[in-house]
């Protein structure tokens, strides 16, 4: 295996909306470099990148895939990422380790919402970016429209390095405004020709624009440009690289990946102009120190992805941020404290695994069977304390419950979900004691379909998914009083306890109970939100103080299983003001039962109210889709809070009850043709409408009766 030093390793992430042609571009690049002798296709399921059974079955990328190629003395590591919003975690982890992002645009469509979503993440990472307008061989290809939209969405520092001479089915000629030549592609060969007279005016204008944009980002080049009226090609390359590193200039290229047009020129630019890891700013550790990308520095790697390999174990993908990593080396996991031995070092080529003896700073590779290492872990040589910032994955947009069809397979399901969660940090599994369900939090319907496929095909389990129970809350709206006597005689010592109780709605800053003698006060911040304030207002020793904790315990037990729907109770004030006890028969259990029943009775008389969780939903869509989005939200009891313009898109903000959000991901994708995205987060609990509350209470009573 040929070795490369740090300065000759380039790491790129192929990014873009689904269908823009990223996987085909990756295939063209490795074909152009001679690593394969025939280009595969997505349609036939024969590409190096989309190698999993699931991707071949569905016909699109689902997982980020690592490839590498060699071009003119450089090694290019390529991370091909999926384009659907549901798999954004794969994109984020790729951007974390890439030194350049290549955003692929569909020349027949222009800038799609997926591209805007990705661009937001590149802004956060400050990733150097290239844009490629692909599919210029399509009969409806419109380079000028795509270029205008790119500038509109991503700023005026998008600058054309290339433009097509003849877009459409016969596309095979590109003008290069950096080299100032025309490239003609035919039969896999590239011919370099002078720029035709008919294109000279446009080429000269774009070349001048390129010089001015580059010079404006570099004072030294600006002075040189003013002095000479021109910049050399080397000056331009130097200036472009510097501006790219500072995320201030975004070169744009042309391609037809399917016909392998433009890939060689793109690879040449990546080699010569795009930064290597050691040209990027040093990594900051969590302690604030700088870690320089140097092959002679302390060994340090960061795990950005884990793949569960059938019959093999976990494959950990990592980037070397410092030092030289050798097979057999032992590194300390800074996050777990465990020592891990890297028995094998591997290069990944789709489904192929290539063993190598070492990997230098800046390179990306993999190893197998690390015992206690996961995504976001930093491993380093002994005697160092290095920890790199973790990848921040987005919160979920969808929650479902899951259960096995066959009883007795719960443990197998638990193991399968644990493994899936280890592979994908955008999947969260929760065993909810409140809802008494196992929940999966994920990014959307497509994401869920992949989880289901894995469980059924890889782990051979039959499962069902469904809408989870809604975590309602119960409270009251007025004061009520009740008393309950618990008396039980069964020979010998019996049980006796009597409690008089007042309950009231609690709110911040309310005065002490009126008309009662307050002798003690306890304030409990509830785990599920809200408060319980418990007052001892007993006068004259009617109930001894030692029984008050038991009364409180009974109240809390009922608050865990509210009277209306069995939901948690919140924001209640309880005053125990009288009662009776027996010298022999009174005990803790008696007063616990009496407290519980007194609370239950008082609650039913205190105008009980069911509360439901409401989420803040933000939908980003095209201008002409705004009406459809709003109409759909209104059918879900949504209240639109506002609409604002963000670049080329509209962002609709609305408050929507969680109970109405099931299936929203697929519904939105359906009526916007996949050109909208959304995010949501919990906002607050609000009262459930009267008729709905009535229905929910009746359903709960009916269900409990059936279970009895």
Image: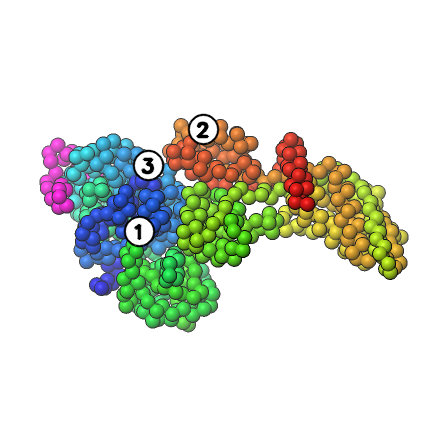
The mark tally for this picture is 3
In the rendered image, residue 517, in percent from the top left (x then y), is placed at 84, 48
Q: Disc 3 vs disc 1: which is toward the camera? A: 1
Instruction: Choose between 55 and 16: the one closer to the eye.
Output: 55
Cα distance between the residues tagged 1 and 2 = 37 Å
Q: Disc 1 vs disc 2: which is toward the camera? A: 1
In the rendered image, residue 24, in percent from the top left (x then y), is placed at 26, 45
Circle nearer the N terminus (1, 2): 1
Residue on which the image places disc 1: 51
Depicted 636 relative to depicted 238: above or below: above
Q: Which residue appears farthest toward the front when viewing the image? A: 406
Mark 3 burial class by Cα count in 10 Å: few <14, some 14-19, many 20+: many
Mark 3 and mark 1 residues within 8 Å of each other at the beta carbon: no
Residue for point 67% across, 49% down? 560
Residue on which the image places disc 3: 111
Q: Secondary structure at mark 2?
A: helix
Residue for point 82% across, 46% down? 484
User: Going by the image, does 694 lie left or right of 336?
Assistant: right
In the rendered image, residue 597, in percent from the top left (x then y), is placed at 77, 47
Q: Secondary structure at mark 3?
A: loop
Residue 52 visible, this angle: yes
| Figure quadrant of the C terminus | top right
Whether residue 196 is in magenta: the answer is yes
Specify the quadrant of the image occupied by residue 620.
Answer: top left
Whether residue 220 is in magenta: the answer is no
In the rendered image, residue 473, in percent from the top left (x then y), is placed at 64, 42
Residue on which the image places disc 2: 628
Magenta span of residues: 184-211
Instruction: Choose between 122 and 282: the one closer to the eye.
Output: 122
């Amino acid at each position: 295996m040929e070795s490369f030093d740090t300065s000759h390793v380039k790491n790129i992430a192929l990014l873009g909306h689904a269908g823009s042609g990223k996987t085909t571009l990756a295939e063209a690049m490795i074909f152009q470099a001679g690593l394969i002798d025939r280009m595969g296709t997505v349609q036939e399921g024969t590409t190096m990148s989309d190698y999993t059974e699931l991707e071949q079955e569905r016909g699109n990328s689902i997982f980020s895939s690592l490839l590498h190629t060699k071009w003119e003395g450089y090694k290019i590591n390529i991370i091909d990422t999926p384009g659907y919003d549901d798999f954004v975690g794969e994109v984020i982890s790729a951007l974390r380790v890439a030194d350049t992002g290549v955003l692929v645009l569909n020349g027949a469509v222009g800038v799609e919402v997926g591209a805007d979503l990705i661009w937001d993440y590149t802004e956060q990472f400050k990733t150097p970016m290239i844009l490629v307008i692909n599919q210029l061989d399509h009969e409806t290809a419109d380079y000028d429209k795509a270029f205008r939209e790119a500038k509109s969405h991503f700023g005026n520092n998008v600058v054309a390095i290339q433009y097509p001479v003849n877009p459409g089915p016969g596309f095979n000629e590109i003008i290069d405004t950096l080299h100032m030549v025309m490239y003609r592609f035919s039969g896999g060969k590239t011919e370099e020709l002078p720029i035709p007279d008919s294109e000279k005016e446009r080429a000269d204008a774009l070349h001048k624009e390129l010089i001015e944009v580059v010079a404006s980002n570099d004072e030294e080049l600006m002075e040189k440009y003013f002095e000479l009226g021109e910049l050399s090609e080397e000056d331009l390359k130097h200036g472009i690289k510097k501006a790219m590193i500072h995320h201030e200039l975004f070169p744009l290229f042309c391609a037809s990946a399917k016909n392998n047009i433009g890939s060689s020129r793109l690879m040449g630019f990546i080699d010569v102009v795009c930064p290597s890891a050691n040209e990027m700013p040093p990594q900051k550790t969590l302690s604030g120190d700088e870690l320089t990308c140097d092959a002679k520095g302390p060994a340090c790697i960061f795990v950005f992805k884990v793949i569960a390999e059938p019959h093999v174990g976990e494959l950990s993908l990592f980037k070397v941020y410092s030092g030289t990593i050798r097979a057999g080396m032992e590194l300390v996991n800074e996050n777990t404290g465990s020592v891990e031995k890297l028995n094998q070092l591997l290069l990944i080529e789709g489904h192929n695994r290539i063993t190598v003896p070492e990997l230098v700073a800046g390179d990306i590779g993999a190893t197998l069977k690390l015992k206690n290492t996961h995504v976001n872990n930093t491993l380093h040589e002994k005697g160092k304390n290095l920890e790199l910032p973790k990848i921040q994955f987005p919160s979920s947009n969808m929650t479902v419950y899951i259960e096995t069809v066959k009883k007795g397979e719960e443990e197998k399901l638990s193991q399968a979900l644990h493994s899936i969660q280890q592979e994908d940090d955008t999947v969260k599994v929760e065993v909810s004691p409140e809802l008494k369900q196992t929940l999966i939090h994920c990014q959307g319907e497509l994401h869920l379909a992949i989880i289901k496929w894995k469980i059924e095909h890889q782990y051979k389990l039959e499962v069902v998914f469904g809408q989870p129970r809604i975590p309602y809350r119960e409270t009251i709206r007025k004061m009520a009083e009740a008393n309950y006597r618990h008396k039980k005689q069964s020979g010998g010592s019996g049980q006796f306890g009597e409690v008089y109780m007042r309950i009231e709605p609690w709110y911040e800053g309310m005065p002490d109970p009126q008309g009662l003698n307050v002798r003690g006060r306890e304030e409990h911040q509830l785990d599920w939100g809200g408060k319980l304030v418990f007052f001892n207002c007993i006068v004259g020793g009617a109930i001894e103080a030692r029984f008050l904790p038991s009364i409180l315990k009974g109240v809390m037990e009922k608050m865990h299983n509210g009277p209306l729907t069995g939901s948690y109770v919140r924001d209640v004030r309880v005053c125990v003001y009288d009662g009776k006890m027996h010298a022999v028969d009174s005990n803790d259990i008696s007063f616990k039962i009496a407290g519980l029943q007194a609370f239950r009775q008082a609650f039913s008389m205190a105008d009980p109210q069911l509360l439901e969780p409401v989420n803040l939903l933000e939908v980003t869509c095209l201008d002409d889709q705004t009406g459809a989005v709003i109409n759909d939200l209104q059918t879900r009891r949504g209240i639109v809070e506002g609409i604002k313009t963000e670049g080329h898109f509209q962002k609709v903000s609305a408050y929507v009850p969680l109970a109405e959000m099931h299936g929203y991901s697929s519904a939105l994708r359906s009526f916007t043709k996949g050109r909208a995205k959304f995010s949501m987060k919990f906002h607050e609990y609000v009262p459930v409408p009267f008729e709905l509350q009535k229905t929910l209470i009746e359903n709960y009573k009916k269900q409990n009766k059936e279970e009895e």
